[in-house]
Image: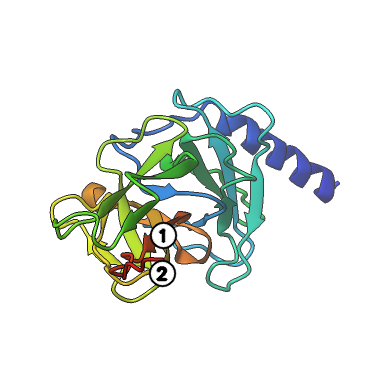
């Protein structure tokens, strides 16, 4: 009988989740995720969890309604820090770019099994995938083909699958695999200026990653890479032909 009563109370608590006040949604995302990055959601509050308390987590939409197909997750606090936390990840719990919301409430341990109010939603923004294209003005040049210091320019452009939120930008880093290949343009980080006058083939790589520092928030990504994407091109520097010697016959 006790088990039946406990089951009924827990079921009622799940129902209450859908009718309790939802609180105020965040004006801006609380944190950003890209790729398969993960975020750990932890309970905090004036009430101190005790062993046996249950924290009920629910994914909701922007209006506060439970998301279809996302069942509530109940984690029981064991007395160990983090035991009632919930970890959500890109690619599994968040499969589309944009905002994803979770709320939580606490059910106290038996015998009372009191249900607390639902929290304000936490807002996690899943950043879109993106591609990188590099476009050299010329894939080859002669060491003596021009008197300018810059022999050719390699441009890079990252294209996100959807519009980026305000404050989220791309960082462009370049690698010239051979020393002396050139340098990043001083006024435009999306450009790499080839200046080498040493005949060789140079692989120039554009590494692009997300930067959310303008939002004042944190970005979570797998391995802390900020979801770096890379694209390369090969620039060939051809030697200047030597001065000919003319013979007659």
Residue located 14% across and 56% down the image: 148
Residue located 32% across and 67% down the image: 246
Question: Looking at the picture, how far across and down is residue 16, in whole percent?
Answer: 58, 31
In this rendering, the count of numbered labels is 2
Q: Give the crowd class for mark 1: few <14, some 14-19, many >=20 residues within 10 Å.
A: some
Q: Is residue 48 left or right of residue 148?
A: right
Q: Secondary structure at mark 2?
A: strand
Q: Can residue 177 be seen by looking at this rendering?
A: yes
Furthest-right residue in view? 1
Q: Which mark is residue 162?
A: none
Residues 168 and 119: in front is: 168
Question: Looking at the picture, how far across and down is residue 147, in whole percent?
Answer: 14, 57
Which residue in the structure is indicated by mark 1?
236
Asked if 128 appears above or below 206 in the picture, the reply is above
The answer to which image quadrant residue 96 occupies is top right
User: Earlier along the polypeptide chain: callout 2 or callout 1?
Assistant: 2
Q: Quadrant of the C terminus?
A: bottom left
Q: Distance from label 2 to label 1 (Cα)?
A: 6 Å
Which residue in the structure is indicated by mark 2?
200
Whether the residues at callouts 2 and 1 have beta carbons within 8 Å, the answer is yes
Q: Give the crowd class for mark 2: few <14, some 14-19, many >=20 residues within 10 Å.
A: some
Asked if 79 appears above or below 190 in the picture, the reply is below
Residue located 43% across and 43% down the image: 133
Q: Is residue 77 left or right of residue 227?
A: right
Residue located 86% across and 46% down the image: 1
Residues 16 and 174: in front is: 174
Asked if 156 appears above or below 43 in the picture, the reply is above
Q: Is residue 10 left or right of residue 247?
A: right
């Amino acid at each position: 009988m006790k088990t039946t009563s406990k089951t009924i109370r827990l079921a009622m608590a799940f129902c209450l989740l859908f009718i309790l006040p939802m609180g105020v949604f965040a004006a801006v995302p609380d944190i950003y995720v890209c790729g398969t990055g993960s975020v750990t959601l932890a309970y905090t509050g004036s009430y101190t969890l005790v062993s046996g308390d249950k924290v009920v987590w629910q994914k909701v939409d922007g209006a506060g309604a439970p998301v279809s197909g996302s069942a509530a997750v109940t984690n029981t606090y064991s007395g160990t820090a983090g035991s009632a936390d919930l970890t959500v990840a890109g690619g599994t719990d968040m499969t589309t770019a944009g905002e994803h919301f979770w709320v939580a409430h606490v059910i106290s341990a038996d015998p009372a099994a009191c249900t607390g109010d639902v929290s304000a939603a936490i807002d996690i923004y899943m950043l879109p995938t993106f591609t990188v294209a590099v476009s050299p003005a010329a894939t080859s040049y002669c060491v003596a083909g021009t008197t300018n210091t810059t022999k050719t320019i390699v441009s890079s452009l990252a294209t996100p699958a959807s519009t980026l939120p305000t404050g989220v930008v791309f960082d462009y880093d370049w690698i010239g695999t051979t020393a002396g290949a050139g340098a990043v343009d001083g006024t435009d980080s999306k450009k790499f200026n080839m200046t080498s006058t040493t005949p060789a083939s140079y692989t120039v790589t554009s590494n692009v990653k997300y930067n959310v520092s303008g939002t004042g928030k944190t970005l979570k990504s797998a391995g802390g890479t900020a979801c770096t994407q890379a694209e390369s091109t090969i620039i060939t520097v051809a030697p200047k032909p030597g001065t000919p010697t003319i013979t007659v016959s």
